[in-house]
Amino acid sequence: MGEFLHALPTHAFLLHALLAGLLASVACGIIGTYVVVRRISYVAGGIAHSLLAGLGAARYLRVVHGWTWLDPLLGAAVAALLAAGIIAIVGLRARQREDTVIGAVWAVGMAVGVLFIHLTPGYNEDLLGYLFGNILMVAKRDLWLMGGLDLVLLVFVGLLFHQLQAVCFDEELARVRGVAVEGLYLLLLVLTALTVVLLVSVVGLVMVIALLTLPAATAGHLTRTMAGMMVVATLLCAALTAAGLALSYAPNLPAGATTIALAGLTYFLVVGGARLVQARRRQVGLSRGTASRP
């Protein structure tokens, strides 16, 4: 920790990494809350793993066909939005088949990505970075993209908070009240897809869903309101990404994996503590009830 703090003011890449973690925390806190409350973690997982198809296709076109302008993240964004659209349409039209379609999008996205990686000559080092994350290699462009997404999400929440809250907790009641449930669900999946794309550079494709859901799920045990859950999840995610970066620096560990390990440990500690508190309250209640009997 001390070595990281000493190196932070003198190394621009560490400052960029820390700022990336803080910017990613805002998106995680907002979208992660909706994913956890709406219980669409599996949907988000399907979108996330479909990114490999876009990443692989973009690199194939860059290397084999000379499309040097095509950034892998752009390919990932296209794949994520396509997956989100397919899942949303099926979820709204044929809900009973949603799990099957999500599984198909998940598997096909991964398979297509692997095929493009195999067809692309050379060592796919940049794709390995997207798979497992490398927050130390975040560029200024990525920081601007994260900041722009955070701004969009804040406007999104400010304008549609109550409607989305109604959709998350009671979809049928929201529909009766005239809320555009289908449109909001599609918009939520689109923003989830964009959030996942940008988080890939922080923790990688393999662990992005953990960063999206664990802080929000932990926050759900610490607060009872949706707004409070967003704030707590954002602060937790910021603390976890900063701690993961600091703890991994000296021993040269993967920062993304360290962050996820800390997030998982925090979640289990909070859940365990909440269970102990509930058990203690139940025991005290039983003791009082026994003592009040004549």
Image (cartoon, rainbow, N blue to C red):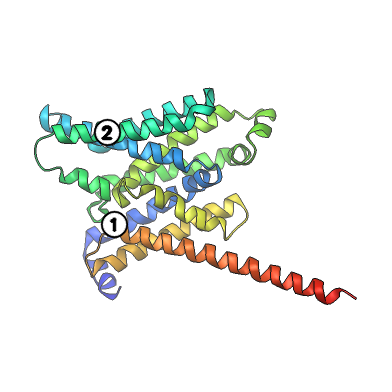
Looking at marks 1 and 2 on the same chain, the residue that comes earlier in the sequence is marked by 1
For the residue carrying disc 1, how many other residues have a C-alpha within 10 Å: few (<14), some (14-19), or many (20+)?
A: many
Whole-Å distance between the Cαs marked 1 and 2? 31 Å
Q: Which residue is mark 2?
A: 111
Do residues under tags 1 and 2 come within 8 Å of each other at their CB atoms? no
- The image quadrant of residue 50 is top left
Front residue of this view, candidates 10 and 78: 78
Q: Is residue 273 above or below residue 113?
A: below
Direction from residue 94 to residue 65 in the image, left or right: left
* Residue 60 location (% of width, % of height): 16, 31
Please tell me how many numbered marks the rendered image carries: 2
Query: What numbered label is drawn on residue 6?
Result: none
Q: Residue at x 35, y 55 (%)?
A: 21
Front residue of this view, candidates 70 and 174: 174
- The image quadrant of residue 15 is bottom left
Q: Which residue is mark 1?
A: 17
* Residue 93 location (% of width, % of height): 53, 22
Direction from residue 250 to residue 270 in the image, left or right: right
Quadrant for the C terminus in the image? bottom right
* Residue 162 location (% of width, % of height): 62, 40
Q: Residue at x 50, y 53 (%)?
A: 216
Front residue of this view, candidates 277 and 56: 277
